[in-house]
Image (cartoon, rainbow, N blue to C red):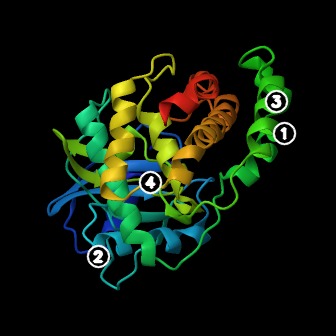
Amino acid sequence: MAVYTQVSAEALTTFLAKFDVGELVSAKGIAEGVENSNYLVDTTKGRFILTLYEKRVAAHDLPYFMALLDHLAARGNRVPPAVRDCAGTAIHALQGRPACLIEFLTGVSVTHPTPAQAAAAAEAMGRMHASLADFTLDRPNSMGSQTWAEQLARCGHDLDKIEAGLFDRLSQALERVLGHWPKHLPSSAIHADLFPDNVLMLGNEVTGLIDFYFASTDIRAFDLAVMHGAWAFDATGQNYDAAVGRALIQGYSTSFGLSDEERAALPLLAQGAALRFLLSRAWDWLNTPADALVTRKDPLAYLRRLDFYETHGAALFA
């Protein structure tokens, strides 16, 4: 989450008048994340999240995201569907951006997850995947493996401003990973971004899975690979927590299951996940507006994950 687009109290009051949510009490921008503009909104009837969708989230994708959230919520998953206005409309416009008012879920995101918390979150992912077995809509992964070469070219040798020789290192890694990318693993709708800050918890209980704006149809086990890289390392990517890593695999296997073929592919999928987030972070690092209220994330933290998975991946997922 972040704030790129400012919303005045007057504009927000007018916007909220379309809903049966009471009158505006307060609104505060949320600085974490890099994708959309988000506000924590309190009204006389409750608390909500206002999201304005920025460049990376296309307006034509919003019906897919809203349908997916409705599908998951109807099957008992703890996700935040959009609030409909008095006319039944979920997707609106505000300050020249597509916008939704989102249900607020209680809980906090953990910074240093324990094995028990990691297992619970992975179990929640497994239940989510089970619920999506009959979800029929399709959306190609806009940040999937078919886009990484283009993203690398777009960053170009500006990558060397982040670290000397980074462009060449990533070029070699990308050729190696894509050359062996699995073609026949099961696919489904996936979250594709289930970092700790997208999981709300109270103690060891998952109270919400949030921020589905990279959700798409892709290799199902890739979702677990993304989660593994996000949860099992510290923020710098220098320290790997083996107990958390094992808990993620065990939790997912318990609630959904992991085939031998999927498990064997996880080392490569994890390297692909590291490349995916390294490239998007690098682009944001090089191009984030100076006046944006946003927390930039270090791309080199994912270079360290990439190197770790290349060296130790086979042993991690055996």
Q: Is any atom of residue 183 visible in this view?
A: yes
Horizontal side, residue 224 vs residue 277: left or right: left
Label whose residue precedes the other's in the sequence (1 or 4): 1
* Circle 3: element type: helix
Q: Is any atom of residue 2 visible in this view?
A: no
Q: Residue tagged by mark 1?
A: 153
* Real-space CA distance between mark 1 and mark 4, rounded to the nearest whole angstrom: 34 Å
* Real-space CA distance between mark 2 and mark 1, rounded to the nearest whole angstrom: 42 Å
Where residue 45 appears, as percent x and y from the top left, is 14, 64
* Real-space CA distance between mark 3 and mark 2, rounded to the nearest whole angstrom: 44 Å
Q: Are marks 3 and 1 in contact (CB under 8 Å)?
A: no
Horizontal side, residue 65 vs residue 25: left or right: right
Q: Residue tagged by mark 3?
A: 172
Q: Residue tagged by mark 2?
A: 74
Q: Are marks 3 and 4 in contact (CB under 8 Å)?
A: no
Horizontal side, residue 15 vs residue 311: left or right: left
Image quadrant in which you'd find residue 87: bottom left
Image quarter where the N terminus lies is: top left
The amino acid marked with disc number 1 is: Ala
* Real-space CA distance between mark 3 and mark 4, rounded to the nearest whole angstrom: 30 Å
